[in-house]
Image (spheres, rainbow, N blue to C red):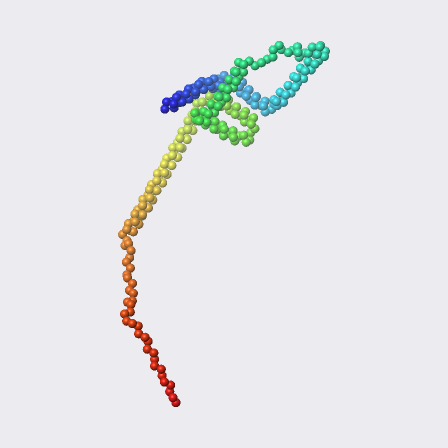
């Protein structure tokens, strides 16, 4: 029991520390999606949509390769031309004394931010799956269902733009019409509750009726079985059979049959 308490305490402490470490990300996304600062939310929305459109319509890899060979061609040509004409390469003159490197602090900060963002997304996904908030899990169910249906008719990038638009503008619409939406949701919940209660009552009545009918049939069959057993117990066990009369054996010796006397022939 002590070990179990220690484990539970350690788990709660770990969850608390995780929640504290992810609080800045929750605050950031809440700030962006709630449109507390319209400029920040608008910039974030436009940036996401522009990134999706760029990935769809711009061949970034091809552009990166093209830019790379143009830069290299320019620097090599400048270096060769400078050495040929001025006996001193132009690219060498522009070379910095110390090449740029990524500071360890900046790299650690970047990795830490990426690690925190990944953990935030992972924790939020688990909270939705394990229904920590019924409304959030229900909304996620509706979104995934609609996405699975729309993916059959819409390209991925269009679906991504639609999802981004809903994620940014649904909270804004709700905040502007919160009273009306809450009233409609309450009315829908009341209607669903009334229908559920009606269905429950009908099912209970049907179950009671089936139980009473089953009880009645069981009583009838039990009575018939008792009657059959009572009839068998009162009937005679077996009918007595009368003895068979056999003929008495003979007491005298059997007599031989008399032979007829031979007749003499008549002489003429």
Q: Report if residue 41 is visible in the image.
A: no
Q: Report if residue 179 is visible in the image.
A: yes
Q: How many marks?
A: 0
Most extreme residue toward the bottom is 268
Residue 235 rendering spot, x and y as whole percentages: 28, 53
Indicate left or right for 47 with 214 as reference: right
Residue 117 vs 199, above or below: the answer is above
Q: Which of 88 and 52 is in front in this view?
A: 88
Residue 17 rendering spot, x and y as whole percentages: 44, 18
Most extreme residue toward the right is 85
Residue 115 rendering spot, x and y as whole percentages: 50, 19
Indicate left or right for 254 with 119 as reference: left
Q: Which of 212 and 55 is in front in this view?
A: 55
Measuring 53% from the left and 19% from the top, which residue is drawn there? 44
Q: In which quarter of the image is residue 75?
A: top right
Question: Where does the C terminus fall, quadrant-wise?
Answer: bottom left
Measuring 54% from the left and 14% from the top, which residue is drawn there? 104
Residue 206 vs 233, above or below: the answer is above
Residue 72 rendering spot, x and y as whole percentages: 66, 17
Question: Where does the N terminus fall, quadrant-wise?
Answer: top left
Residue 226 vs 246, above or below: the answer is above
Q: In which quarter of the image is residue 86?
A: top right
Q: In which quarter of the image is residue 135?
A: top left
Indicate left or right for 54 with 244 as reference: right
Measuring 52% from the left and 30% from the top, which residue is drawn there? 148
Indicate left or right for 248 with 3 as reference: left
């Amino acid at each position: 029991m002590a070990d179990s308490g220690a484990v539970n305490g350690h788990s709660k402490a770990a969850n608390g520390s995780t929640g504290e470490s992810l609080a800045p990300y929750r605050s950031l996304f809440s700030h962006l999606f709630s449109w507390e600062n319209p400029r920040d939310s608008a910039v974030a929305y436009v940036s996401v949509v522009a990134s999706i459109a760029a990935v769809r319509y711009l061949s970034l890899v091809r552009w990166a390769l093209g830019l790379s060979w143009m830069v290299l061609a320019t620097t090599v040509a400048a270096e060769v031309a400078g050495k040929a004409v001025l006996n001193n390469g132009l690219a060498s003159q522009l070379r910095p004394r110390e090449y740029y490197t990524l500071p360890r602090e900046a790299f650690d900060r970047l990795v830490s931010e990426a690690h925190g963002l990944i953990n935030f997304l992972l924790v939020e996904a688990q909270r939705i799956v394990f229904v920590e908030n019924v409304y959030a899990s229900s909304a996620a169910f509706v979104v995934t269902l609609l996405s699975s249906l729309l993916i059959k008719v819409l390209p991925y990038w269009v679906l991504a733009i639609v999802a981004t638009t809903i994620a940014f503008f649904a909270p804004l619409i709700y905040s502007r019409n919160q009273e009306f939406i809450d009233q409609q949701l309450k009315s829908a919940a009341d209607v669903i509750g009334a229908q559920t209660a009606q269905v429950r009552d009908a099912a209970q009545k049907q179950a009671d009726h089936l139980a009473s009918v089953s009880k009645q049939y069981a009583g009838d069959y039990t009575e018939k079985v008792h009657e059959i057993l009572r009839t068998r117990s009162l009937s005679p066990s077996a009918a007595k059979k009368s003895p068979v009369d056999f003929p008495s054996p003979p007491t005298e010796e059997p007599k031989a049959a008399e032979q007829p006397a031979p007749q003499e022939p008549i002489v003429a």
